[in-house]
Image (cartoon, helix red, strand yellow):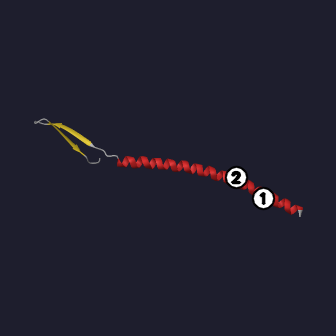
Amino acid sequence: MIIAALAVSIAAAAASVDAVWYARRSARSSATSAVAAETTATLDSQRRHAELTPQFEITCTVGDIGSAITASFGRR
């Protein structure tokens, strides 16, 4: 009976050590995942901002009557 109790307590101690190791690994993994998600969100935000930024082309020409300024508001 004493040997069975000793075996059960050793198994419980091993299981608790494994649980602590798994919890630390999980916490480290979630921190890494959070950093990766933040980086991805930042890059996506920058890409979206660059896509929505309008680009204008302004051309100035001088003619016989004076100055004429034309502007094209299309995207390049």
- Kind of element beneath mark 2: helix
Residue 59 got which mark?
A: none
Q: Percent position (x, y) of residue 2?
A: 89, 61
- Residue where numbered disc 1 is placed: 12
Residue 27 vertical position relative to residue 71 in the rendered view, above or below: below
Q: Residues within 10 Å of mark 2 (few under 14, many from 20)?
A: few
- Kind of element beneath mark 1: helix
What amino acid is labelled 2 in the image?
Answer: Trp
9 vs 46, left or right, is right
Q: Residue at x 25, y 46 (%)?
A: 73
Residue 66 vertical position relative to residue 49 in the rendered view, above or below: above
Q: Residue furthest right?
A: 2
Please tell me in which quadrant of the rendered image residue 1 appears.
bottom right
Contact, mark 1 vs mark 2 (Cβ under 8 Å): no
Q: Percent position (x, y) of residue 66?
A: 13, 35
Q: Residues within 10 Å of mark 1 (few under 14, many from 20)?
A: few
61 vs 43, left or right, is left
Q: Residue at x 82, y 58 (%)?
A: 9
Q: Percent position (x, y) of residue 55?
A: 30, 44
Q: Residue at x 40, y 49 (%)?
A: 48
Q: Residue at x 18, y 37 (%)?
A: 61
Q: Percent position (x, y) of residue 68?
A: 16, 38
Alpha carbon separation for disc pair 1 and 2: 14 Å
What amino acid is labelled 1 in the image?
Answer: Ala
Residue 55 vertical position relative to residue 19 in the rendered view, above or below: above
71 vs 14, left or right, is left
- Residue where numbered disc 2 is placed: 21
Question: Could you tell me how many numbered marks the image carries?
Answer: 2
